[in-house]
Image: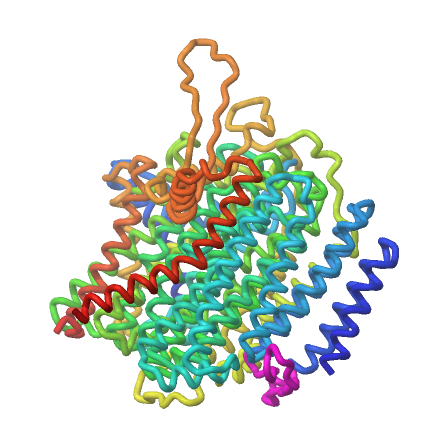
């Protein structure tokens, strides 16, 4: 079976290499659809309770490789499949503009298929070795996807930043696996479970934290997030959508998988995750607000949403530790549903940003404006996704956030004093995240799509073609389905969540906040809400149908000639916010004071930087550079010297142990005297 | 059903009472109590002017804004009667559906491309965002106190027994009055009667709305006041018998309206850049309530 899959993969690669440009895309899409169909079939079966198991007979290198798709893998496989599918369909049309770059497209198509294949592989193998191979395959293919536009220096820089950091993540994960293999002698995932059963809780927690650090770099938890805001904007839009939608979620999968395997002190782990996640969420959205590059803004929102997912996981863990059933169920359900939700609306947002980029040739929001009149479909799609990401009803974001709130309020009644403080912290954090997200997306939507155009070239903007909009509409339909019929998806999540909760004995005397039952009621409320809005719109139409409706200029408050430059800008929209947040953020302002009576042209410029990046990345690198500069004299470009260094090294390797040995003998001799 | 009827009834008179209070304290004759309602009816009869800059967002926003507030009213209970719907965590729904309305009112203001309306929108977005944690921690504290997470259950099991719980009730009322003032863009955060666009928040956001839309937005404003009044009343009425609770409810609503009128008569608006600090202070007060609840539940032992 695996041989067949690999053969198909190879055949596809070879055919992509050999056919002409148009067919490259078609072949990749058909292969993606094929993989989606096969894996979804297996995954749906696994989600309904029949795990798929397969033991691939070992080679010398790996030993036997167990493949198992359980409910958790299945949920992530389905999530991955949908976004990869829409990404492929969107990307096919998006990349039509680059048809003349044949070699780049070939590489792009192959890398795309490899990413999909690797992601599915990561979700299904149960062997550390093969897991790492798939992980590396994913990291490298994503790197190739990101640097599609590699003639721009920023793209290369972002790509390198990404690849370096994802290898740091691999180091952490590898360290964890090697430690387990060192203790148990096996690279199978079952060994990790064995290990945690036999070692102390402290060792288990340490192991989990090691894995967590590795996966957190991939997912973008603060302070491991710094690669993310560079890589997402540099990539082509469908790749940004896929990266933000599913590639960073594979880190979440890793964390959840390790939680399943490592049986340890869940309460401590839960508090750590909860704290980091709340900080991640708040920090992500705080930085998102001050971004002026639409794609960078969305990238920071991915960090925020990873934070929300993390809060769900944290609550789930604490629920497991405290034997609080509903808290655990709601936390994990919320986290996993939000994983799906975020992959939907975030990919949709990136696709919309891609449409804007192709039409207006810019994603600098200060140069955009009034696009809703030129691109109504894109604008409405962006609006729906923006509402969803803010967690506003009646869309899918609300459902998962509601579940997480439900988990938090379940905790309320059984918490001790200290944990109540943690609870208020994360509750306040979650609310603040929601509020700041509203601020951010009202800014992004209204500056990009509303008002008048701010830059020349506004008149040439045209709506994107039907085929590029189609995958976006598919995503929206899916999002609305989750928003209006959440119980179906919550039921589908029963099996994955059960994996976490089934062998914990719960304390049943606690007060239950049944957020899941509440969602049933909320369903009807949403339907009523939508119907009422339609009713009101019709009523308004009827009332105003025979009345005078005039069109005039915007009221300029007494000023006669209004200009598009007089509009509120993104910077001014968030000015009071950035003044408030100044102590936390790093905002640089270049301003020239106006002092003469008839001032000449003046410039005003603000830019922001990530303070955590300054502290955790830039500073250590600067120190490292200073250290290595000390040895600069060694690098003098003379070949003879280099050969000399080599000889000195070899001699040292041979002689140092010998001399040490001699010294030890002498010491031994002296001791015996 | 009773609850929503009472809210609608109070919304009818609420703004009128505020205006009346203000005119009495300033020694004017002033308009009648029903003048705000008459204003709205007049607006409903009028035609409208739309800016050429605006898009469909501007046209659908007032309707969504109104619907969201009406929807939020549905979960509010009255005494021993549930709201139209009541479920665990309904206050989360309440807050988020209001946020939806706000989202649309903000982008609708931005849709006009006017610099003044952008100013109002930006302030509205920031201020209401800061008010939200205060609300959630407040309701969370009472959820902890009562062991329930829906408006109805919280209100019906809330017993104002000891002196500490009375203090909590008063503090809660204070926070809710302040949140209501922020959400309705009233003094001391915003001055609805100012004539300078630069110092407005809500008024400047609706500069370009006219006719039916403006009427709808004003109705929403009245409804919002009555809605917060109903929540405040909920904290004090408990489950009194009907002949007592209805007059008590109406009295509390009227008292709330008079308070708003008095605040507006005797207080000046804060400086715009002091507003965020003031709103953040609200969160601290609600944290104080939370600590008070911990004290009542003897969690500090």
Task: Read off the magenta span.
Answer: A44-72
**Residue at figure coordinates x 61%, y 85% from the top left:** A46
Res B294 seen here = yes
Task: Pick the residue in front: A250 or A89.
Answer: A250
The image quarter containing residue A151 is top right
Q: Quadrant of the C terminus of chain B?
A: bottom left
**Residue at figure coordinates x 31%, y 73% from the top left:** A268
Depicted A167 relative to depicted A128: above or below:
above
Q: Quadrant of the N terminus of chain B?
A: bottom left
At which x and y percent is residue B64? 55, 56
Task: Pick the residue in front: B222 or B295.
Answer: B295
Task: Pick the residue in front: A264 or A277.
Answer: A264
Can residue A69 be found in the magenta stretch? yes
Res B218 seen here = no
**Residue at figure coordinates x 41%, y 30% from the top left:** B196
How many numbered markers are drawn? 0
Depicted A160 relative to depicted A532: above or below:
above
- Horizontal side of B135 relative to A539 (left or right) equals left
Q: How is the image coloured?
A: rainbow
Can residue A88 be found in the magenta stretch? no
Depicted B233 relative to depicted B61: above or below:
below
Task: Pick the residue in front: A191 or A667.
Answer: A667
At which x and y percent is residue A183? 41, 80
- Horizontal side of A664 relative to A299 (left or right) equals left
**Residue at figure coordinates x 41%, y 54% from the top left:** A223
At which x and y percent is residue A267? 32, 75
């Amino acid at each position: 079976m695996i041989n067949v899959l690999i053969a198909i993969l190879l055949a596809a690669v070879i055919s992509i290499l050999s056919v002409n440009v148009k067919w490259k895309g078609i072949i990749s899409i058909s292969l993606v659809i094929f993989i989606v169909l096969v894996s979804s079939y297996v995954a749906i079966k696994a989600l309904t309770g029949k795990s798929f198991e397969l033991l691939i007979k070992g080679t010398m290198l790996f030993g036997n490789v167990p493949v198992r798709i359980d409910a958790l893998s299945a949920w992530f496989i389905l999530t991955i499949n949908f976004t990869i599918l829409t990404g492929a369909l969107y990307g096919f049309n998006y990349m039509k503009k680059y048809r003349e770059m044949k070699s780049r497209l070939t590489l792009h198509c192959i890398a795309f298929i490899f990413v999909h294949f690797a992601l599915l592989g990561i979700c299904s193998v149960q062997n550390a070795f093969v897991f790492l191979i798939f992980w590396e395959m994913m990291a490298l293919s994503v790197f190739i996807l990101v640097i599609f536009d590699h003639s721009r220096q920023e793209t290369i820089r972002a790509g390198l930043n990404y690849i370096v950091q994802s290898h740091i993540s691999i180091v952490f994960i590898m360290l964890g696996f090697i430690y387990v293999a060192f203790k148990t002698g096996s690279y199978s995932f079952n060994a990790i479970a064995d290990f945690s059963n036999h070692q102390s809780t402290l060792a288990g927690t340490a192991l989990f934290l090691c894995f967590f650090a590795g996966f957190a770099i991939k997912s973008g938890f603060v302070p491991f997030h710094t690669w993310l805001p560079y890589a997402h904007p540099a990539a082509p839009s469908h790749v940004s959508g896929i990266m933000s939608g599913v590639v960073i979620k594979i880190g979440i999968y890793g964390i959840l998988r390790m939680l399943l395997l490592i049986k340890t002190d869940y309460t401590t782990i839960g508090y750590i995750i909860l704290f980091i996640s709340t900080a991640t969420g708040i920090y992500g959205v705080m930085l998102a607000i001050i971004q002026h590059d639409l794609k960078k803004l969305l990238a920071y929102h991915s960090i925020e949403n990873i934070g929300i997912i993390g809060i769900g996981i944290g609550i789930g863990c604490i629920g497991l530790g405290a034997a609080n059933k509903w808290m655990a169920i709601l936390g994990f359900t919320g986290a996993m549903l939000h994983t799906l939700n975020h992959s939907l609306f975030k990919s949709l947002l990136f696709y919309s940003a891609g449409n804007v980029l192709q039409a207006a040739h810019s994603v600098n929001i200060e140069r955009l404006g009034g696009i809703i009149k030129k691109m109504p479909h894109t604008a409405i799609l962006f609006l729906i996704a923006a509402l969803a990401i803010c967690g506003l009803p009646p869309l899918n974001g609300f459902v998962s956030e509601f579940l997480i709130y439900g988990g938090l309020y379940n905790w309320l009644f059984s918490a001790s004093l200290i944990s109540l403080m943690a609870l208020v912290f994360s509750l306040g954090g979650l609310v603040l995240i929601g509020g700041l997200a509203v601020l951010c997306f009202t800014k992004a939507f209204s500056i990009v799509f509303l008002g008048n155009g701010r830059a020349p070239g506004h008149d040439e903007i045209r709506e994107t073609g039907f085929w590029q909009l189609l995958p976006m509409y598919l995503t929206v339909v899916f999002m609305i389905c989750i928003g209006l019929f959440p119980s179906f998806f919550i039921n589908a999540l029963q099996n994955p969540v059960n994996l976490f909760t089934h062998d914990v004995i719960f304390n049943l005397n606690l007060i239950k906040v049944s957020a899941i039952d509440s969602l049933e009621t909320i369903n009807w409320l949403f339907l009523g809400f939508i119907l009422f809005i339609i009713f009101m719109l019709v009523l308004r139409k009827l009332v105003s149908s025979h009345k005078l409706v005039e069109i005039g200029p915007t009221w300029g408050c007494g000023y006669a000639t209004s200009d598009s430059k007089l509009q509120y800008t993104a910077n001014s929209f968030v000015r009071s916010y950035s003044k408030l947040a100044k102590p936390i953020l790093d905002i640089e302002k270049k301003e020239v004071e106006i002092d003469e009576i008839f001032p000449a042209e003046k410039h005003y410029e603000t830019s922001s930087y990530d303070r955590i990046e300054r502290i955790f990345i830039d500073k250590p690198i600067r120190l490292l550079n200073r250290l290595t500069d000390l040895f600069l004299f060694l690098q003098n470009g003379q070949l003879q010297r280099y050969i000399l260094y080599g000889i000195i090294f070899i001699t040292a390797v041979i002689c140092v142990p010998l001399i040490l040995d001699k010294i030890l003998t002498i010491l031994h001799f002296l001791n015996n005297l | 059903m009773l609850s929503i009827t009472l809210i609608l009834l109070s919304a009818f008179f609420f703004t009128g009472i505020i205006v009346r209070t203000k005119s009495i304290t300033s020694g004017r004759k002033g308009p009648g109590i029903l003048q705000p309602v008459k204003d709205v009816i007049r607006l409903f009869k009028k035609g409208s002017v739309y800016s050429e800059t605006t898009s469909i967002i501007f046209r659908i926003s007032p309707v969504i804004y109104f619907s969201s507030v009406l929807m939020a009213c549905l979960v509010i209970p009255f005494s021993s009667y549930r709201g139209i719907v009541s479920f665990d965590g309904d206050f989360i729904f309440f807050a988020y559906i209001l946020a939806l309305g706000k989202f649309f009112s903000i982008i609708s203001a931005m849709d006009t491309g006017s610099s003044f309306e952008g100013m109002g929108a930006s302030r509205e977005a920031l201020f209401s965002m800061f008010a939200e944690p205060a609300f959630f921690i407040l309701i969370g504290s009472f959820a902890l106190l009562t062991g329930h997470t829906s408006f109805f259950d919280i209100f019906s099991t809330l017993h104002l027994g000891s002196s500490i719980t009375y203090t909590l009730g008063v503090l809660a009322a204070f926070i809710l009055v302040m949140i209501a003032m922020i959400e309705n863009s009233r003094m001391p955060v915003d001055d609805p009667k100012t004539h300078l666009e630069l110092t407005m928040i809500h008024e400047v956001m609706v500069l370009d709305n006219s006719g039916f839309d403006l009427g709808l937005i004003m109705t929403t404003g009245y409804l919002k006041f009555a809605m917060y009044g109903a929540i405040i009343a909920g904290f004090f009425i408990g489950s009194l018998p009907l002949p007592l609770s209805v007059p008590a409810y109406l009295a509390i609503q009227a008292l709330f309206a008079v308070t708003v009128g008095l605040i507006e008569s005797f207080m000046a608006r804060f400086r715009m850049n002091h507003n965020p600090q003031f709103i953040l202070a609200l969160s601290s007060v609600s944290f104080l309530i939370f600590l008070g609840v911990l004290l009542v539940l003897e969690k500090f032992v």
